[in-house]
Image (spheres, helix red, strand yellow):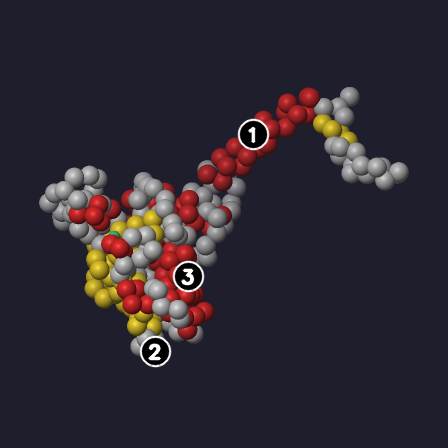
């Protein structure tokens, strides 16, 4: 007979260890695995209805709340351009698709859009962006930038200033080495923000200053790690003294 002693204490108050028989142990983990696989297949095939935000295979809704599946869904977009296009269509941003290979020369661009604004947040200029970077920017704006501006200043962000996204070059403009994420429009250099009351926050000026603007910038940089694969700040090196480098490379690095 299997032994299943899972009680924590007996009548004398002495504690006993839970014991499971070898037969139970042998079937426990395969059973959990099979049950998990059946549930996963049921959700995947649509046999078990679950809300889209809790379905790992449902398109990412950029208007929805973040949860532990958001990062997984965001990374999937890089491998699935139609899925990414479907996600962007929910974003509430102004953008237009760019045909594959229409821009580029030595660094032809694929799966790219031109972003004109991020909904309520205007841009210092339109820029080219891979679809996954655009999706990450929407999440970053909604779940990090706007809440941090309200928390620190009680203001809305009305403009994001940047130094550009697309540049056909190697990392740090070196003559040799690997291409930068900028060469695929998969990175954006953000230089600052403007708030609803006209306050300008400039990374080159405000990062090190001991005031609310500096605290805001540090919180924004930390929060950006939830949306982007790589976040580089002025603390990384002198080349980033005036901007946050945000990209969607396959690697992960966060300060
Ligand atoms: Zn950069």
Q: On the picture, is 17 further left or further right than 167?
A: right
Q: Does any atom of ligand 1 lie closer than 8 Å to the CB of label 2?
A: no
Q: CA distance from mark 3 to mark 2?
A: 20 Å
Secondary structure found at label 3: helix
Q: Earlier in the sequence, mark 3 or mark 1?
A: 1
Label placed on residue 8: none
Residue 32: quarter of image: top right
Residue at 41% x, 73% y is 153
Estimate the spatial distance between the alpha carbons at disc 2 and disc 1, rounded to whole Å. 57 Å
- Image point 81% across, 38% down: which residue? 9
Answer left or right for 63 relative to 204.
right
Would you name the residue on which mark 1 appears? 34
Give the residue number, with chain letter if any, for mark 3.
219
Residue sticking out furthest to the left: 105
Question: Badge 2 is on which residue?
Answer: 197
Mark 1 lies on a secondary structure that is helix
Question: Which sits in the foreground, 65 or 227?
Answer: 227
User: Residue 196 at x, y = what percent?
Assistant: 34, 75
* Residue under the image location 46 percent in, 37 percent down: 45
| Mark 2, secondary structure of its residue | loop
* Residue 8 seen from this side: yes
Placement of 16 over or under 113, stated as above or below:
above
Tell me if label 3 and label 1 are in contact, CB under 8 Å.
no
């Amino acid at each position: 007979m299997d032994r299943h002693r899972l009680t924590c204490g007996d009548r004398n108050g002495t504690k006993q260890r839970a014991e499971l028989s070898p037969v139970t142990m042998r079937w426990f983990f395969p059973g959990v695995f099979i049950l998990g696989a059946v549930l996963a297949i049921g959700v995947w095939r649509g046999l078990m209805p679950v809300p889209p935000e809790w379905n790992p295979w449902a398109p990412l809704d950029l208007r929805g709340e973040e949860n532990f599946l958001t990062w997984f869904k965001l990374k999937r977009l890089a491998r699935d351009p139609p899925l990414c296009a479907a996600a962007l269509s929910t974003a509430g941003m102004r953008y237009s698709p760019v045909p594959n290979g229409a821009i580029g020369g030595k660094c032809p661009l694929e799966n790219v859009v031109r972003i004109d604004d991020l909904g309520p947040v205007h841009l210092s200029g339109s820029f080219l962006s891979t679809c996954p970077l655009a999706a990450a920017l929407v999440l970053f704006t909604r779940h990090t930038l706007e809440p941090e501006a309200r928390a620190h200043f009680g203001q809305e962000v009305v403009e994001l200033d940047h130094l550009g996204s697309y540049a056909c070059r190697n990392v740090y403009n070196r003559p040799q080495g690997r291409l930068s994420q900028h060469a695929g429009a998969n990175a954006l250099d953000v230089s600052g923000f403007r708030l609803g009351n006209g306050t300008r926050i400039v990374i080159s000026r405000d990062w090190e200053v001991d005031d609310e603007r500096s605290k805001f910038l540090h919180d924004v940089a930390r929060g950006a790690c939830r949306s982007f694969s790589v976040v580089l700040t002025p603390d990384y090196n002198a080349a980033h003294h005036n901007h946050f480098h945000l990209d969607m490379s396959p690697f992960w690095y966060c300060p």
